[in-house]
Structure formats: structure tokens, C-alpha cells
Image (cartoon, helix red, strand yellow):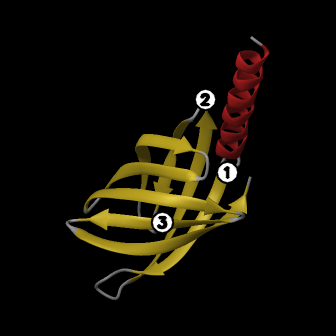
Amino acid sequence: MRKRISWRIVVFGVLLTLVAAAADVSGKWKAEFTTPDGTQRVNTFTFKVEDGNLTGTVAGSQDETPIKNGKIAGDEISFSAERPFGTFTYNGKLSGNEIKFKVTFNERTFEITAKRASS
């Protein structure tokens, strides 16, 4: 009986840790990058996390679009955004004040790094 209770406490602690880490991405993040076709871009991500769900926006130089299908679990983050030139899918990993994203667009994949601008 004690082992069962101890195991539940451990599982609860792990889940609490994952939720705490998920809350850490809320705020503004900025990524300066070069697209596969050589174009220089700057995107600003505004994230909000509630109960493991990720919402917010992705803003470029001429647009701002809502995040769709946002998920966060521990240090893993994923979402999509309908940008003016198509759907982008973002899969990232949080490390301190950086998120390294693998971005997929039109069967092309490239990587960007977003840095925390504010919380």
C-alpha cells in the first residue's frame, strides 16, 4: 500500500514539473533567420500557456497570424500558423532562453532559433 502511494506521489511530482516547465514559454520571443531561398526574415512569437495548451501569434514584417494546434509538454513545443504564403508547422525544444525550431513549409524544412524578448 505504501509503495503504491509513494509511486503516485512521484508521478504527481513529475507531472507538476512538466506543467511548470510548460509555463516558462509565455511571453514574446524573436527569431532572426534566413529562409532556404536566402531571404532574411524576423518573426516575433507571442506565446501564452494554460493547462498545457499553447496559444498566441506569429508576426512577420507585414502580418500577424494566430497559432493553431498549439501543444507543449515539458521542453517540447509544437504548433502551426496560416501565414500569408501558406501553412507553417513549428516543432521546437526549449533550452533556457532559446527555442530551437524545426520549421516545415511546402515540404521544405529549415531551422530557426527564437530568443526570449520578454515574459
Mark pair 3, 2: CA separation? 22 Å
Query: How many numbered badges does the structure rendering display?
Result: 3
Ranked by sequence position, the earlier of labels 1 and 3 is 1
Camera-nearest label, 1 or 3: 3
Task: Identify the secondary structure beneath mark 2.
Answer: loop
Q: Nearer the viewer, mark 1 or mark 2?
A: 2
Q: Position of residue 109 (x, y in %)?
A: 31, 71
Question: CA gap, disc 1 to disc 3?
Answer: 17 Å
Instruction: Say whether residue 105 is left or right of residue 21.
Output: left
Q: Residues within 10 Å of mark 2 (few under 14, many from 20)?
A: few
Q: Which residue is mark 1?
A: 27
Q: Amino acid at mark 3?
A: Phe
Of label 3 and label 2, which has the lower sequence position?
2
Q: Quadrant of the N terminus?
A: top right
- For image coordinates 28% across by 85% down, the residue present is 37
Q: Identify the element where label 1 is drawn.
A: strand
Provide the residue designation for mark 3.
101
Q: Which label was assigned to residue 87? A: none
Q: Does 15 sit above or below residue 22? A: above
Q: What amino acid is labelled 2 in the image? A: Asp
> Which comes before the other along the chain, label 1 or label 2?
1
Q: Nearer the viewer, residue 33 or 107?
A: 107
- Which residue position is annotated with label 2? 51
Q: Is residue 3 above or below residue 34?
A: above
Q: Residues within 10 Å of mark 3 (few under 14, many from 20)?
A: many
> Which residue is depicted at the point 41% across and 58% down?
90
What is the secondary structure assignment of the residue under circle 3?
strand
Would residue 50 be found to the left or right of residue 91 on screen? right
